[in-house]
């Protein structure tokens, strides 16, 4: 499940009032989420959660669920 | 008029013979170093690279490809892309690299674009990956198609590739044309530029001289090969001069921009071409802790090209990475286009691109007048003097030459100028005047150097990628609620990212904020289908858009009106 906190960071960065972000949502389905804004989103997520992603971790993400899992892992939350 | 000097290339020379001579003379020297995130780099040496290219040439030949036929290559970052491309050249066929469709691009839009290119270029073969077959196959089977077949060379077995290279012989004949380059676009507006072996070789030698290329150089690039900067400045320049090319994947670099600096540091790179936005992208998006082992002191030149060069971008980049050994004099600039093979002007090595301060208001009136008061000034970055074999003029609308410091359209004449857009005499006639190519860019000359300050044409350039407003307007016109034909798409400078942002201004007969927001979202989503991100959507009441004398909404006038009247951001803008 995508946390409200992560959802808000993504939507704010994309200047969207609302968009249904699910685990299987991919960047190409979300208005404004292109390769350049992807890096902006990643930076915003790092800042929000006070975490750092490695380049390879970022490159291997293929949907929002995986981003959520990575965030959870970094902040020490167990991933189901 | 300002110009460089001359030195000729023999008529019999081809790029293939040039590459072959490197393989014979220096078979163990590194030719291409292929980088992929998380993998050890794959290092092509000249001997292996050319023998593999010969095998692919043989494979293409037994699958029906003949000299002079056009082969579109639609292949992602792969270590075998290079010998496939070179194999096409070795066979005497004409390679044309096209962008592999992004997942955002709707298959129908991609197919329409490819169909347009097929019509304009007479594509004979598509060399691609199996995953793309369902999308491309219908183009082969439809009546009237020029495309004769699909080939999947990355899957070819050892038998296809084995041994037969010698059958091609060493006395093979090459057509005059070397390669095709296409402009971007999705609705069949793409133009194909055909370049001869002579034009390419002339250009590579002269351009190489202008940047002082030498055997100690190593080019590092993430630029895609469907872009002239990636194909000519990185690929052809490296391979023809026999200096190593280190190639990264564009998508990986965008997502993890530190990769370029890590690679430069590891490989001791010396030359790198970048569009302006890349300077911002790296300065803003790379973490300090990722730079611990990075050094940039090997770099001779970072060459800013293919977008408007901004002084602020160079300053930000230098301030951010100077501690890694980056030198100010490594910040160079170039003015280039596919029609002249690549470069028109170039700043010299070991000299930072000159920056001058001109009066903003005078510049808008067409005169570059030096200005010392910062509030009144616009900083303009030099793109350098014409390279050898190239001449530029700055001309008025009336075609007369303008004097130094007057802003006008830049016209170019060059020994490596294209002969025209393939199968498009009308468009060709539009851009040539008495042997001079009218670039559609505005600029002025100061101290013998060229300063590009704007565009006459409506083209939008986002992150180095050319977008045609027509493509975007066509899609937006079909969105429910938008008045058909009452749309303009324009590019607006975005200082934060160092590139342009796409704005859509459309007339719509809508009631209420909810309906407006819904339509704005629908427009953004519709334009995503052609892999374009819209920065702002302005929905305006009927008859808001200003028409040109031809009766169509004027992009320039409406862009200016939007900048004046619609900023700051309105509540319902996206």
Image (cartoon, rainbow, N blue to C red):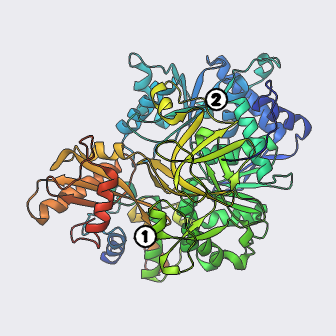
In percent of the image, x 72 and y 63: which residue is there? B264
Which image quadrant is residue B143 in?
top left
Q: Residues within 10 Å of mark 1 (few under 14, many from 20)?
A: some
For the C terminus of chain B, the image quarter is bottom left
**Residue B159 in view of the camera:** no
Image coordinates of residue B569 in percent, x first then y, are 28, 71
Pointer 2 chain: B
Disc 2/disc 1 C-alpha distance (Å): 40 Å
Image coordinates of residue B318 in percent, x first then y, are 65, 74
Which image quadrant is residue B109 in?
top left
Residue that carries the numbered disc 2 in the rendered image:
B156
Q: Is residue B87 left or right of residue A70?
A: right
Image coordinates of residue B387 in percent, x first then y, are 72, 48
In percent of the image, x 40 and y 39: which residue is there? B186
Vertical relation: B229 (above or below) B127: below
- Say which mark, if any, is on residue A41: 1
Vertical relation: B113 (above or below) B560: above
């Amino acid at each position: 499940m995508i946390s409200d906190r992560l959802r808000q960071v993504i939507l704010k960065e994309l200047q969207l009032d609302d968009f249904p972000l699910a685990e299987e949502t991919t960047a190409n389905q979300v208005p404004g989420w292109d390769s350049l804004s992807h890096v902006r989103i990643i930076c915003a997520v790092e800042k929000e959660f006070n975490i750092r992603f490695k380049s390879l971790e970022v490159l291997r993400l293929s949907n929002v669920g995986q981003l959520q899992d990575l965030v959870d892992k970094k902040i020490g939350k167990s991933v189901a | 008029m300002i110009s460089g000097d001359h030195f000729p290339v023999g008529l019999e020379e081809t790029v293939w013979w040039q590459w072959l001579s490197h393989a014979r003379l220096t078979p163990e020297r590194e030719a291409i170093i292929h980088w992929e995130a998380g993998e050890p780099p794959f290092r092509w040496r000249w001997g292996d690279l050319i023998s593999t290219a010969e095998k692919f040439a043989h494979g293409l030949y037994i699958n029906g490809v003949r000299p002079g036929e056009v082969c579109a290559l639609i292949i992602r970052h792969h270590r075998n892309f290079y010998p496939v491309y070179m194999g096409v050249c070795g066979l005497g066929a004409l390679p044309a690299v096209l962008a592999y469709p992004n997942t955002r691009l709707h298959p129908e839009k991609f197919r329409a674009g490819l169909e347009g290119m097929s019509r304009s270029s007479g594509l004979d073969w598509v060399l691609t990956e199996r995953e793309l077959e369902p999308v491309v196959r219908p183009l082969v089977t439809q009546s009237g198609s020029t495309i004769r077949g699909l080939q999947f060379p990355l899957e070819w077995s050892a038998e296809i590739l084995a041994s037969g290279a010698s059958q091609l012989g060493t006395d093979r004949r090459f057509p005059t044309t070397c390669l095709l380059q296409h402009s971007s676009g999705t609705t069949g507006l793409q133009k194909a530029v055909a370049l001869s072996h002579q034009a390419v070789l002339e250009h590579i030698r002269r351009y190489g001289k202008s940047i002082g290329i030498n055997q100690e150089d190593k080019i590092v690039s993430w630029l895609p090969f469907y872009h002239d900067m990636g194909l000519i400045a990185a690929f052809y320049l490296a391979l023809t001069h026999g200096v190593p090319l280190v190639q990264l994947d564009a998508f990986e670099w965008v997502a993890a921009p530190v990769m370029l600096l890590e690679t430069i540091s590891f490989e001791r790179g010396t030359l790198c071409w970048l569009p302006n936005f890349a300077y911002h992208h790296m300065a803003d998006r790379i973490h300090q802790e990722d730079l611990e082992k990075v050094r940039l002191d090997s770099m001779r030149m970072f060459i800013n090209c293919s977008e408007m060069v901004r002084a602020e971008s160079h300053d930000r980049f230098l301030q951010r990475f100077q501690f890694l050994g980056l030198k100010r004099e490594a910040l160079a600039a170039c003015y280039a286009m596919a029609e002249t093979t690549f470069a028109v002007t170039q700043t010299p090595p070991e000299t930072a691109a000159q920056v001058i301060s001109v009066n903003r208001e005078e510049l808008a009136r067409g005169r570059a007048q030096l200005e010392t008061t910062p509030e009144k000034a616009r900083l303009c970055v030099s793109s350098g003097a014409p390279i050898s074999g190239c001449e530029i003029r700055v001309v008025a609308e009336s075609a007369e030459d303008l004097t130094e410091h007057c802003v006008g359209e830049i016209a170019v004449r060059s020994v490596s100028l294209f002969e025209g857009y393939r199968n498009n005499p009308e468009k060709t006639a539009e851009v040539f005047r008495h042997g001079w190519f009218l670039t559609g860019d505005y600029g002025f000359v100061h101290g013998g150097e060229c300063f590009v300050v704007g565009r006459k044409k409506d083209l939008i350039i986002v992150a180095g990628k050319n977008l045609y407003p027509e493509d975007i307007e066509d899609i937006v016109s079909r969105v429910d609620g938008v008045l058909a034909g009452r749309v303009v798409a324009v590019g607006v400078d975005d200082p934060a990212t160092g590139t342009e942002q796409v704005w859509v201004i459309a007339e719509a007969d809508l009631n209420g904020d909810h309906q407006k927001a819904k339509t704005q979202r629908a427009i953004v989503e519709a334009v995503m289908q052609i892999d374009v991100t819209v920065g702002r959507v302005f929905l305006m009441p009927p008859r808001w858009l200003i028409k040109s004398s031809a009766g169509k909404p004027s992009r320039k006038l409406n862009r200016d009106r939007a900048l004046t009247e619609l900023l700051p951001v309105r509540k319902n803008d996206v």
